Each structure stands twice: as structure tokens, then as C-alpha cells.
Amino acid sequence: MPKYDIPLARPNLTNAETDAVVSVLQTPYLSLGPRVTEFEEAFAQYCKTRYAVSCSSGTAGLHMLVTAMHIGQGDEVITTPFSFVASANCALMAGADIAFADIDPETWCIDPKRFEEAITENTKAVIPVDVFGVIADMDSIIDTARRNDLRVLEDSCEALGSVYRGKMAGAVADAGVFGFYPNKQMTTGEGGMIVTDDEELANLCRSLRNQGRDTMGGWLVHPRLGFNYRMCDINAALGTVQLSRIESIKAERTRVQDLYRARLADEKRILMQRITPGCKNVSWFVFVIRLDNRYSQEDRDKIIISLREMGIGAANYFAPIHLQPFYMERYGFKEGDFPVCEALAARSIALPFHHQMNEEKVDIVCTELQKLLD
């Protein structure tokens, strides 16, 4: 038996979520019912946007937005290589090509200078990712995008509730996307949400998620190619309750983040993510540390294995997208192409991060980690 039982992640659920889901099951409206609209309206109000469009996942939301922006074959989208693979896959799913720009070594978000250098005559959009809850340098990114007539699609799947210069995450760019997988700040089991102030974009995404139907057409009328990316009322009911609790959920995660940062403040062998200037009230997705350069990727992997054997959840966050086999084969990417991303990815460790973490558990994790660093 492992020495500890400290999982990497846990959803923050109460009886209110259970009651909401059961209440839907007691009606005939399991899909295309009123709970989806209720969730969307509450979400738009929270993000301070005109529109919110629910969908089946953050990946689905990204795919629909790229498609709705009329980006496709012959076009190019720039994003960060340090993210979950969906941040890049969405462009390929729409028929476009992907290009990467290396990251800032301190915030771990896309580097605005590298983004500008990556622009070509085929570039049509940029997807900055709010990494682990920290919003990218959106002022610089949007300024560069506007000067080059590019759309800006904010991947906020990890940053619900973060604020950038007075704007909520997801509301900073032309449109934003959130994901509600169970390890996120809030969950719908599976699900996602698009937010925007652009009415045309919102309406097109509503059509795309519903097999290309229009609001005024019949069930068997499909004016455009679409997808089955709808969210059902069961997921929406869960999400509505979770959203009503989001500030308390954020506070719990901030408490755990603060415990880790205080406990590891004097540890010279690790680095922690810096917050972008202008980013406030960070809504933390995970707690990730970076080992310093004396440690290799092999050293990091051994530490993760050892922590797991003790019963302490740990993982590498993230593997570079450009070094995934598919991307290397398709585009010829290789080690050394994006060195800042690669150095971070080789030494990053996600530690247990959820509302059940207390000071004692954080101290156990940090103590065992420090022993392994010796």
C-alpha cells in the first residue's frame, strides 16, 4: 500500500450539484431544454460578455470558433507549443495549418515578440493560451494582431475567473473558450463554453454546434456543415450550480496555491510561474513547479514516479505540442525548435491541487519532493 493518499486533482462538488442533476432527470428535457439557456445566460453575465454559447468540450469550442472565423485551407494559425494539444489541433481540424511561437520563460505564456516574428502572409489568427490560469500579455498580442489584421481567439480553458486589466478571462479578445473537464476550476463532467460580444460569431457557433441548423429552420434543414457539439441539460444544470459557487471555489484554490508558494518560497532548486503584469485575481487551474537547470528530464521523470509510488499525485505539465509524433511527422518539427518551451516542459511537475488540500498535506508533498531533490 502507498504511504499516502493525496490525489493530483478532485472536483469540488456538493449536494446542490446532485440535486440539480436529479431535477433534470425528473423532466422530459434532457437535451435542448431550458437548463442550457439558463447556464449560458449566467455565464455571459459572469464573463461580462454579450453572448455565451455552450458546447460539448473546450476542444469543440476552439474548433467551432476557428471555423466560424472562416479560417481554413491555405490559412495559418499561431499558438504556443506549451499547452494541451487541442490549442493547436483546432486549426488542423478546420483545415488550416499551425505555427508556433515560443513562450516567455517566466509567465510560461506565448511570448509576444516571438509571436510577431512568426507571422507570415498566410497567418490569419493567433490563439494565446491562459496557461494554468495566468492570462498572457494580451495588450501586446492584440496590438500586433490588429496591425496585421489577425483574429485573436483566447484559449481560456484553464483560466475561468482570472482578470486582465479589468476584463474577465475569455472576454479580452474577439472571442474566448472555456473547458469544464473535472480537474478544471468548475466542471460539467464534460463541456465547454464560447464567449464573445460578436453577434454574428455567436449565432454561427450556435448553428455549427447543432449540425448546421439555423434557429429559424426545421429540424431536418441544414444550411451549412455542422457538428454534434451540443451540451445537454444534465451537464448545464451541473454547470449552473458550479458557476454559482465559482468565487468560493476560486478562493479555495487560491488558498492552496498560497500554501505551496509560502512553503517553497526559499527553495532555490525550483522556479514558480510569474503572473503577467495586468493579470489580477488569478484563478488557478493547477500548481506547477519548474526544476532548475541542474535537473534533466530523466531526473524529473524519476521524481514523478517516486511521488506516485508514495501515493502523491504528480504529472508533467505539459509535453511540447511540436514534439508530439503527429506534428513532427507532418511539419518536420524537432528538438531545439522552441527551446524555452522545451526546457520548461522537461522540468515541470504538477503537484496535488484541489480543495481537499490543507497545510498538512501541502507540507507532506513539499517535504517528500525536497527529499527527492537532494
Image (tube, grey):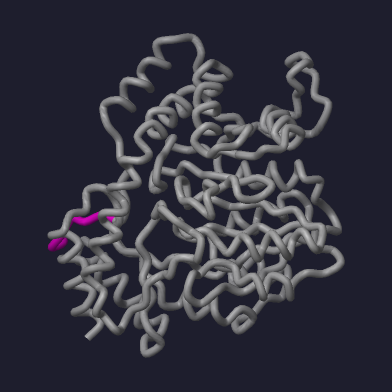
User: Which residue shows up at 47% across the image and 75% down it?
Assistant: 106
Q: Is residue 196 visible?
A: yes
Q: Nearer the viewer, residue 334 or 131?
A: 131
| Residue 206: quadrant of the picture | top right
Query: 44 above or below 3?
Result: above
| Residue 187: quadrant of the picture | top left
Q: Quadrant of the C terminus?
A: bottom left
| Residue 264: quadrant of the picture | bottom left
Place of residue 224 in the rendered image (x, y in percent of width and height, measured from the top left) = 82, 31
Start and end of the magenta stretch?
Answer: 1-7
Place of residue 302 in the rendered image (x, y in percent of width and height, measured from the top left) = 32, 77
Which residue extends farthest front? 166
Which residue extends farthest bottom? 294
Q: Quadrant of the N terminus?
A: bottom left
User: Which residue shows up at 30% across the image and 35% down it?
Assistant: 13
Place of residue 151 in the rendered image (x, y in percent of width and height, measured from the top left) = 75, 53
User: Which residue shows up at 77% across the image and 14% down it?
Assistant: 218
Left or right: 301 as drawn, with respect to 195: left
Q: Is residue 328 visible?
A: no
Q: Is residue 3 magenta?
A: yes
User: Which residue shows up at 50% across the image and 28% down it?
Assistant: 42
Query: 121 above or below 199?
Result: below
Magenta stretch, overall SS: loop
Q: Nearer the viewer, residue 55 or 195?
A: 195
Place of residue 304 in the rendered image (x, y in percent of width and height, measured from the top left) = 31, 71
Q: Nearer the viewer, residue 356 or 219?
A: 356
